Amino acid sequence: MRLCDTWNIGGRIGVGTFLFLLLLSSPVFAGGAPASGKTVNGLVLETQYLINGISQSGVTDPAWPEAELRVWINSAIEDINVLAGAQESSERFTVSTGTSEYAMTSSYLYLKDVAYQTGATTFRTLSKGKFEDVGNLQKADEPAYWYEVNGKVGIYPLQDTKDATASGNTIYAIYVPLNSTLSGASAIPTPAMFDQAILYFVAKRAFAKHGKVDMAGYYDTLYNREVFVRKGIYEKERSIWDIIFPKNLTPEKGQQ
């Protein structure tokens, strides 16, 4: 789902107001939902209850060690990110004359979008292009497409020597991060709406390990249904205004 086509903010809220807000909150690309807030160990416990891996007296089943469940939770988060792009981060680059490719410094699974900023009030997303088209399209003063190659994000078409109008502008590469291994105390980085999908993923792995194919298949069905239903909700919530004005997650006075 594309973030947006071309929009001009000056006609909506006034340039002065926008500049003031922009100074308070520079553009940050993020998803439309906050992170879960639960920990890996918290989901380990929930998984144990789901698969009857813990008794009412609190005795854990040695067939499903907690260390193993933590590994599968890490795998679940990566799989959900691949399927639904549930986490988003961004890198910001200033366009410079004669430079069409900019190296990403973060580890990532894939790039989702590239947005282009010209001046203080105009933003637009670039269309996903093809590496083969670079240098083969009619040149323009500003880029219209982006591509990815060897850990770099490229933009095109650009003039070779007359890109003064593009130089100094900004591009934002929005990517799905490749997380470091989460420990038991680590916070779950994906949105809360995907917590149930994580449990189903771990449950299917747990039952598959012990050859319980029917139960593994049952939880695999639940997992896929949960991911794609939540993906639809997540993408519907994903808004360009979250990019320009990140959501204030602190409750307003009187709403606690």
Image: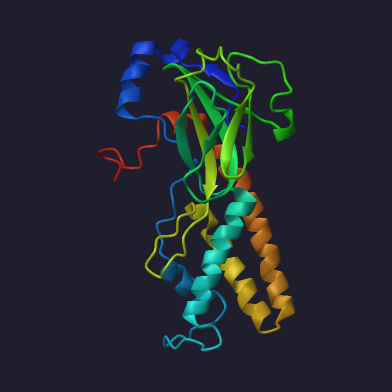
Vertical relation: 13 (above or below) 214: above
Left or right of 157 in this view: 9: left
Residue at left offset 58%, top offset 17%: 142
Residue 237 sits in which quadrant? top right
Farthest residue in the left direction? 253
Q: Quadrant of the N terminus?
A: top right
Left or right of 139 in this view: 171: left
Front residue of 34/123: it is 123
List x then y, in percent, for residue 223. Answer: 64, 62
Residue at left offset 51%, top offset 48%: 87
Residue at left offset 49%, top offset 54%: 190
List x then y, in percent, for residue 132. Answer: 74, 32
List x then y, in percent, for residue 125. Answer: 58, 27
Left or right of 92 in this view: 84: right
Vertical relation: 193 (above or below) 158: below
Observer able to see residue 29: no
Front residue of 141/42: it is 141
List x then y, in percent, for residue 45. Answer: 45, 74
| Count of all numbered marks drawn on residues in the image | 0
Observer able to see residue 226: yes
Residue at left offset 62%, top offset 53%: 82
Vertical relation: 32 (above or below) 66: above
Q: How is the image coloured?
A: rainbow
Residue 127 sits in which quadrant? top right
Front residue of 187/114: it is 114
Residue 15 sits in which quadrant? top left
Left or right of 194 in this view: 83: right
